[in-house]
Image (spheres, rainbow, N blue to C red):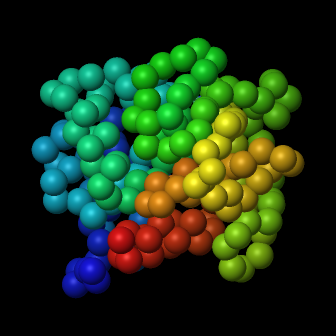
């Protein structure tokens, strides 16, 4: 199905850097919608779960059955989780264990990098045209135990940092904090062709 309008893509706007994601989505040709209530999900073609503090985001999702509605949405429509958002999407979370949407077949280890590379900016090769990508890592998780249908689009050293499983996309870094819009465009294209 092709959309006859620019795709309406939600950004979970509970906590974290959702405004930067909304701006990035506009630049990538989508109509961003700040999502704070589960009933807003109905009008969306896709959603971004931004970085922030996954525990804090989870606490807000406890209200009004938001968690269950979001989980249902993620199984039907494209979703892109960045940093804390990727933790929310994982099948299992460690360090410590917490609830997750289980939409992405991997385990997320929170705050997996030692103090020295806790937060860093690196430029690495990715499976997107246009050359290496800048990646901003802030207290990033490590994605491990990837299922067989999870495709790795980029690695930092040996760790997968940009992955995709069907209509689920996840980055352990913050693409909204770089000027390069290729990743948001890639997500918007996947929403349009979903
Ligand atoms: N460390 C955060 C968490 O565990 C994620 C950090 C981020 O989103 N920048 O939820």
22 to the left or right of 185: left
Query: Which quadrant, please, contains the N terminus?
Result: bottom left
156 to the left or right of 106: right
Q: For residue 70, which quarter of the picture?
A: top left
Residue at x 53% of width, y 47% of height: 82
Q: Position of residue 136 (x, y in %)?
A: 69, 49
Q: For residue 175, which quarter of the picture?
A: bottom right
Query: Which quadrant, please, contains the C terminus?
Result: bottom left
Residue at x 27% of width, y 64% of height: 45
Q: How many marks?
A: 0
Q: For residue 10, which quarter of the picture?
A: bottom left
Judging depth in this view, the residue of 120 and 104 nearest the camera is: 104
* Ligand 1 quarter of the rendering: top right
Residue at x 58% of width, y 15% of height: 96
User: Visible in this render: residue 184?
Assistant: yes
Q: Position of residue 126 (x, y in %)?
A: 73, 66
Above or below: residue 184 compared with residue 94: below
Residue at x 52% of width, y 71% of height: 186
Judging depth in this view, the residue of 136 and 152 nearest the camera is: 152
User: Visible in this render: residue 86?
Assistant: no
Q: Position of residue 193 (x, y in %)?
A: 38, 77
Q: Seen from this angle, which residue lies furthest top?
A: 96
Above or below: residue 33 compared with residue 28: above
Q: Seen from this angle, which residue lies furthest front?
A: 148
Q: Position of residue 164 (x, y in %)?
A: 56, 57
């Amino acid at each position: 199905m092709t959309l006859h309008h620019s795709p309406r893509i939600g950004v979970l706007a509970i906590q974290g850097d959702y405004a930067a994601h909304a701006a990035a989505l506009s630049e990538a040709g989508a109509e961003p919608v700040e999502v704070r209530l589960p009933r807003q999900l109905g009008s969306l073609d896709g959603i971004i779960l931004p970085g922030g503090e996954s525990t804090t985001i989870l606490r807000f999702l406890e209200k009004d059955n938001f968690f269950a509605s979001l989980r249902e949405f993620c199984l039907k429509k494209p979703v892109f989780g960045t940093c804390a958002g990727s933790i929310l999407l994982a099948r299992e979370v460690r360090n410590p264990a917490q609830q997750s949407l289980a939409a992405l077949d991997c385990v997320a280890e929170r705050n997996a990098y030692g103090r020295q590379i806790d937060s860093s900016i690196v430029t690495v090769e990715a499976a997107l045209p246009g050359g290496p990508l800048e990646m901003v890592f802030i207290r990033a998780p490590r994605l491990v135990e990837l299922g067989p249908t999870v495709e790795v689009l980029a690695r930092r050293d040996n760790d997968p940092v940009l992955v995709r499983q069907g209509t689920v996309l996840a980055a352990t870094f913050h693409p909204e904090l770089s000027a390069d819009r290729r990743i948001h465009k890639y997500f918007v294209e996947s929403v349009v062709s979903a």
